[in-house]
Structure formats: C-alpha cells, structure tokens
Image (cartoon, grey):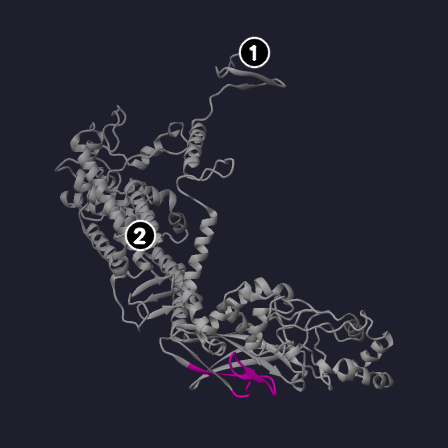
C-alpha cells in the first residue's frame, strides 16, 4: 500500500513513496525565496487501536469537564454566588467548591501553577510528552476539528483528492459545512469560557438578548476566532513554532523517558515484503507508510525523536494494525526509551529505571509545593488583621501636652459569619482609644464585621505626656474574638523621628 | 535638470537625481504603503462626515454621530451622581451623629470627605489637615469656632469673613496700626499674653499691662484670657494660636490684627457633601 502525501511527479530515483510533510519541507532548499518555510499540507488518516480509543475517551472527558464545570452549583450562604467554580472579578473573589480566595491570597494560584508545572516536569521525565499527546487543549480541539473534517470530506485519500479537484458545488458544500461546524464549535468554546467569570445561567440568558457585559462578547469573540484559527487552520504549526514547551521539554527528557519510538533494532533493514516471503535477514518494517499517514504533525517517526512529535501514539496504532495483518508481533513502533533501543542493539536486556535523579528531584519539589499548599489551606485564618498608621500627620500634639496618633485598622472577615471583636492596645500606659462617633475610652473597643467583608476602623490613640518614654514606641493592637486573638504591630510617634 | 537614465544592473530607470555619484532608482512605492495611504484618505473623509471636524464661521461641523466631549463629561457626571444617589440621599436625611456612628455611612462619608478635602481644603489646611500659620490646624483639639459636628458644619457651610450673611465674623482691632495703643503699651501687652500662656515674662510689664488688657482685650478674650468661641476669640491661656505664639508674632498680631478668610463652601457643595466633609474632619480631630 503506498500513499502519496504531496502531489509531485514520480522520478526515476524516487518512485511513488510515502514521504512525511516534514521531510518534504526540509527538502525544499530555499523555500521558494520566501522569508518563511512554506507549509506542506498534512492529511492525517484515521487510526484504530488502543491509543486512539484512549484519545477519544480523553477528548470526551476533557471537553465535558470544560463545558460542564461552570454549570455546577454549590451551596453558599445568602448573597454569595452559587456557582461551584467562579472567578468573580467584580466581587473580587475566586470560588472553587469549598474554597473561597480573596485577591490577597493569589499566592495559592501561584502555588497551583507551580504544582502543575512540577507535575508536568515529572510526568514528562517519566513518560514523555503525555500532556502534548493527550491533554493539551491544542491537541484536543485539533483532534475534534480533524474528526469534523473527516465527516465532511472523508478520510486522508478522499481529502487529498478533494483538495486537488477543481471547485464544484459538492466541494463548496463539503468545505462550507466543515467551516460552519468548526465555527460553531469555536463559538461554543469561546462562549463556555465566559461562564467561568459570571453566573452561568444568568449570563446564558443575557448573552443571547444582548444584555451581557461587553467584555463577555469581546472574550467570546476573541476565543471563537483563536479556537477556529488554532485548531482549524494552524494546527501542528502551533505546536512546532508557537509553543515553547517542545523546546523546554528537551531539558526534562533523558534516555530513560518513554517516548513514541520506532524500534530500529527490530525494524531495520526495512523494505517491501511479499506474502510468504521469509523474514530472516531483514527488519519488520515493510515501509508501508501508515505511521506517516496517520501522523497529525506530519513527521516520519522512523527518523527518530523530533521536536514536532507530540507523542500521541497514533503511529503505534497504525503500525500495530499492519503488524497484526502480517502476523508479526505488535510494537514495532511503541512507547519505549532510547536507552532500551540502544541496549537491545548492543544485545543487552533493556531496563526501565523509574527512580532517576531528575524524577526524584521533580517528585520532591512536587511534594514540597503540594505540602506547602495543603498546610497553607488548612491553617488559613478566617480573619486578617492589619494596621496602617497615619503618615500625615505623623502625630498631633493636644492642648494639654498629650500626643495623639491615628491608625486605620483593616479587619478582613473571610468567613460567611458575622464576627464581633474587641480591640485593645498594648505598649503604652494611661492611653485612651477612640473610634469615630464615640468618646475616648480606656476600655477595649468593640467592632462588628459583616460576613465576607473588610471593615476599616479608624482608631485615635491618645497618650499622656508621662507615657512618652521615647519618641517612637512599639505598640501592638490585639483583635480578639472568643478565645482567638490576632495581633498587629505598629509604632506610636511623639516627635519627628529621623527629622534633622 | 538632470537626465533620467536606465540603471544597468537592475534595468530600472533612475529618477535623474544624483548625490555624490549615488543615483536614486525610480521604483514604485511599496504596495502596502500605498494601500495604507489611500485607506487613510478614505478614513479621513469618513471621519469628516461622522465626527465634528471642520471649523465654520460661528461653530463647527457637528458630524452625524453627534459626538461631543462636553456632553460626554456632563453625562458621566450625571451618571456618577445617579450611582451615588442612594448613599447621598441617605446622608442628606441622616443626622451628623448617625452618619458618624453607622459603619456604612461613615465609610462613605470618609471616602467623600477625604476626596473633597484633598481637592478643596488641603490648599490652605495642608493635605494632613494640620494647617500652618494663619490656617487652622484641623487635627488637634483646639477650635476657634467650636469643634462639635454642628459647629464644624456651620463653619464649612458659611465660611469665615466670607461675605456670607451667616459667616463666622470676628474683627480684632489693629491696636498698633490704627493708633489705638502706643507701641510701649503693646510691648507690655505682649509680655502679659506670654504670661497668660504659662511662660516666664517681665513682671513689671505685666503689672503695667493688666488694666490695658482689662480695658481693651477682656471684652472678647475674657477677663482670664480664656477666650470665647461665639466671637472666635482664641483662648490665650494655651499657646495653640493661628498667628504664632512667640513674642514677635504676638506683638505683630496686636499691632496689625490679622484675620483670614475662608470661603462659604455651602455655595459650592450640596448638603450631603458638606455633611460628609464635616464627619471626616470631626472624626479625624477626635471630635468634641
């Protein structure tokens, strides 16, 4: 079986032979005098097998997660959003099921990103580019778009023929239908994104009648276009040219990382095979080109690991199908390691060590960050207490010689219950506290903070002259509720400290 | 005039211009540049029709979109007013004491007060409200015209010597400049005032000045010099004075009788803004 990827005249030296798009592009010496390498069209063939099945399942799962999450409800006290996952920019909160984060706690998001990076590093060191091949949105949506393409234009050969054919009504209908469905998927993708930032049912209703905020329409529009362009027209170019990860992952991989590998120890020397012919003295590769035909990035895996390879395993499925038909063992192309291939070539037994220095480091880093995150979340205080002292004026001298300093106490109540605190001050003697609307008192002040609110409390502290042992005195405000106390340190000034 | 010729290597005609042996090829303008150029012209024509652009004798061409920056500002201001309507109505209805005690009204009043103070009051009273010579300190507990909420509201609304019929009015005579008292009597009075504020002073001068003080000053400042807020006469037994407390400043004040002017802000701000400003100032001064 021979399939032509690019239509060109067969020459004497190269008979009709399957050549990868990457090889064709490499063969064009000067790229036609253009600044950029011309793109060679890729027509991935539908593969059947274990990895294709897993990819379909993951496609359905990841898309389902993406589309369904904004519609999950989660019970919260009155007034708080009932959406399980919500990035509420207007309310300045991030809701994730039972977790509610304030903007000041954005470091949890940072921690989550570090965790994701470490997990990605670890998985890459162990199993290669699993992310690229199965879970990356670019891969998932490209896969979906190719499936749609297949419905309208048929599989690989039919698509090559259709593209070569002159324009006709049938071709226009096929192409038009494909782009229409692509755009619909793109709109659904961009449209679903905005539900993460607004109450989904409300936004769904207002979106269609033009009542949604302008940002919703702009975001949906931009993401519709990017989805359509990235998954529909740019596809593998995103992975090869735009994404930094293929470059970075070179540092995560080593000879023991699993990658889609052509086992050249078994496959070479390759060549056509006639039925009934003897297999001795030759490799198992019959040069059928199926691995090239199914490749979504247009490479020939037999050239070895390449930056374009997203490790999706479709060539593994394609090759296994042929091997089964030829009654040869499966796994000529398989998830394997460079070291294993070298070992077999040298006649040694291949080993697959999971514990290597890099996997240990990545695991340790992942465990450390996860531990810090868990500890941070578990010990998170429901109340944050901070003191800002007035800078202008730094202090006020009163007619009786006493000195007054002004402070703003910020009390953030992160819980959904109303809290009543008492505020006291340590560090001075004979001082009085005063908050607007009440007389100075030597007793503690009482303030109430509503659920999920920050309250700024102005406190004026007055100290008699005899209490001013130094120009700058350290003081501590204590905020108490029941048995718990939160403290915040500040200073009490009675002269221009540091002034010449 | 130079001649056009054909450049041999490229086969393109030159413009005929030559500088030090360098000749310019007459290449056409890049297409993208021409497209942008013509698109700009088209854009300009569309802009003239849509937007205000051409000056006319008395006015300008308004453009069919009716764009007007002035109208936009007015609309934005009206929008702002509408957004604040609920809170400012609440403030206008509540008493000053209620505003200061209620957390929600208080925080709104502080926000408005701080902004208004910074834009209007800070010029004289300073950004921290601590004043300077001739401008009252609004942070301490010494008040010339009273430091209760109502008194502060009254002062802000009607001003001091502002020409407003209800303005705070006081007029200390310029004892020296108008020749009411001889310079040596003013010197004696200066010592007397220094002594009133519990500082060491010349005893004989104080004895000479006592009848002069009783005759000229006690009417407003009181026989003991403790001042009277109704007439804006400062308490002379402390030393927190608008025009300074050293001997030179005291003598200058008795001689020339400075008296500043504060505008009547009630003419510029609505009632709820004045209330917010009052609460802001009162709370930051510790209230009275």
Q: Is residue A427 magenta?
A: yes
Relative height, residue A99 to residue A240 (above, below): below
Q: Is residue B85 left or right of residue A403?
A: left
What x and y, as percent, mark residue A88? 36, 62
Q: Is residue B91 left or right of residue B18?
A: left
Task: Please report the bounds of the magenta region as a residue range.
Answer: A420-443
Q: What chain does badge 1 belong to?
A: B
Q: What chain does badge 2 belong to?
A: A
Number of marks drawn: 2
- Badge 1 is on which residue? B3
Circle 2 — which element? loop
**Tag 1: Cα neighbours inside 10 Å, few (<14), some, or many (≥20)?**
few
Relative height, residue A480 to residue A259 (above, below): below
- Badge 2 is on which residue? A136
Q: A496 or A172: nearer the eye?
A: A496
Q: Are marks 2 and 1 in contact (CB under 8 Å)?
A: no
* Residue A299 in view (yes/no): no
Relative height, residue A198 to residue A449 (above, below): above
In which quadrant of the rendered view does residue B39 lie?
Answer: top left
The disc label shown at residue A69, or none? none
Q: Give the CA separation, mark 2 to mark 1.
A: 65 Å
Q: Is residue A332 magenta?
A: no
Looking at the image, which residue is at 54% across and 78% down? A459
Q: A258 or B33: nearer the eye?
A: B33
């Amino acid at each position: 079986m021979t399939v032509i990827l690019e239509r060109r005249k067969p020459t004497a030296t190269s008979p009709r032979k399957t050549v990868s798009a990457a090889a064709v592009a490499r063969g064009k010496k000067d790229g036609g005098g253009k600044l950029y390498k011309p793109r060679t069209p890729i027509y991935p063939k539908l593969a059947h097998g274990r990895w294709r099945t897993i990819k379909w399942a993951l496609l359905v799962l990841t898309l389902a997660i993406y589309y369904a999450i904004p519609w999950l409800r989660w019970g919260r006290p009155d007034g708080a959003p009932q959406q399980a996952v919500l990035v509420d920019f207007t309310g300045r909160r991030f809701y994730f099921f039972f977790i509610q984060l304030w903007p000041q706690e954005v470091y949890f998001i940072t921690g989550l990103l570090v965790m994701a990076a470490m997990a990605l590093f670890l998985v890459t060191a162990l199993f290669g580019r699993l992310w690229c091949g199965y879970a990356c949105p670019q891969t998932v949506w490209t896969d979906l778009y190719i499936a749609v393409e297949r419905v309208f234009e048929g599989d690989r050969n039919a698509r090559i023929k259709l593209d070569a054919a002159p324009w006709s009504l049938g071709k226009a209908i096929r192409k038009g239908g494909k782009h229409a469905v692509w755009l619909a998927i793109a709109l659904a993708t961009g449209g679903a994104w905005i539900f993460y930032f607004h109450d989904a049912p409300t936004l769904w209703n207002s979106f269609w009648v033009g009542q949604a905020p302008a940002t919703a329409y702009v975001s949906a529009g931009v993401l519709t276009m990017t989805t359509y362009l990235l998954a529909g027209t740019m596809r593998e170019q995103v992975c090869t040219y735009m994404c930094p990860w293929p470059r970075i992952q070179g540092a995560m991989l080593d000879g023991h990382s699993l990658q889609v590998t052509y086992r050249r120890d078994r496959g070479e020397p390759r060549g056509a095979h006639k039925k009934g012919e003897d297999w001795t003295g030759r490799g198992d590769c019959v040069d059928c080109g199926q691995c090239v035909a199914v490749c979504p990035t247009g490479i020939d895996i037999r050239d070895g690991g390449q930056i374009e390879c997203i490790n999706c395993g479709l060539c593994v499925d394609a090759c296994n199908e042929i091997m089964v038909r030829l009654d040869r063992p499966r796994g000529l192309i398989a998830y394997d390691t460079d070291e294993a291939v070298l070992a077999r070539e040298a006649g040694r037994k291949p080993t697959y060590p999971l514990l290597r220095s890099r996997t240990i480091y990545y695991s340790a880093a992942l465990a450390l960050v996860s531990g810090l995150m868990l500890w941070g979340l578990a010990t998170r205080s429901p109340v944050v207490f901070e003191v800002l002292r007035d800078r202008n004026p730094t202090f006020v001298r009163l007619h009786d010689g006493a000195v007054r300093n002004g402070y703003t106490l910020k009390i953030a109540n992160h819980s959904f219950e109303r809290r009543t605190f008492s505020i006291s001050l340590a560090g001075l003697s004979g001082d009085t506290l005063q908050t607007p609307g009440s007389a100075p008192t030597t007793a503690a002040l009482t303030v109430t903070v509503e659920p999920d609110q920050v309250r700024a409390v102005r406190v004026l502290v007055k100290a008699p002259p005899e209490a001013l042992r130094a120009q700058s005195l350290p003081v501590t405000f204590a905020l108490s509720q029941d048995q718990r106390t939160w403290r915040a340190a500040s200073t009490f000034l009675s002269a221009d400290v540091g002034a010449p | 005039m130079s001649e056009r010729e054909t450049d041999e290597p490229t086969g393109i005609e030159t413009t005929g211009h030559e500088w030090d042996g360098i000749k310019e090829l007459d290449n056409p303008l890049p297409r993208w540049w021409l497209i942008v150029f013509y698109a700009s012209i088209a854009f300009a024509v569309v802009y003239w029709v849509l937007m205000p652009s051409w000056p006319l004798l008395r006015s300008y061409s308004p453009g069919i979109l009716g764009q007007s920056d002035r109208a936009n500002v007015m609309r934005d201001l009206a929008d702002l007013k509408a957004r604040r309507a609920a809170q400012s109505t609440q403030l206008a209805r509540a008493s000053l004491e209620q505003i200061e005690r209620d957390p929600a009204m208080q925080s709104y009043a502080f926000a408005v007060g701080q902004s208004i103070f910074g834009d209007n009051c800070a010029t004289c009273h300073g950004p921290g409200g601590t004043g300077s010579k001739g401008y009252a300190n609004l942070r301490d507990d010494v008040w010339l015209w009273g430091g209760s909420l109502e008194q502060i509201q009254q002062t802000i609304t009607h001003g001091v010597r502002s020409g407003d019929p209800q303005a705070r009015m006081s007029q200390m005579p310029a004892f020296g400049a108008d020749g009411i008292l001889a310079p040596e009597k003013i010197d004696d009075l200066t010592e007397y005032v220094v002594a009133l504020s519990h500082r060491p002073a010349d005893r004989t001068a104080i004895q000479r000045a006592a009848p002069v003080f009783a005759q000229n000053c006690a009417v407003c400042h009181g026989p003991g010099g403790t001042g009277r807020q109704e007439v804006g006469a400062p308490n002379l037994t402390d030393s927190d004075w608008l025009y300074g407390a050293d001997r030179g400043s005291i003598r200058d004040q008795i001689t020339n009788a400075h008296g500043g002017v504060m505008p009547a802000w009630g003419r510029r701000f609505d009632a709820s803004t004045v209330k917010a400003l009052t609460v802001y100032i009162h709370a930051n001064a510790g209230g009275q």
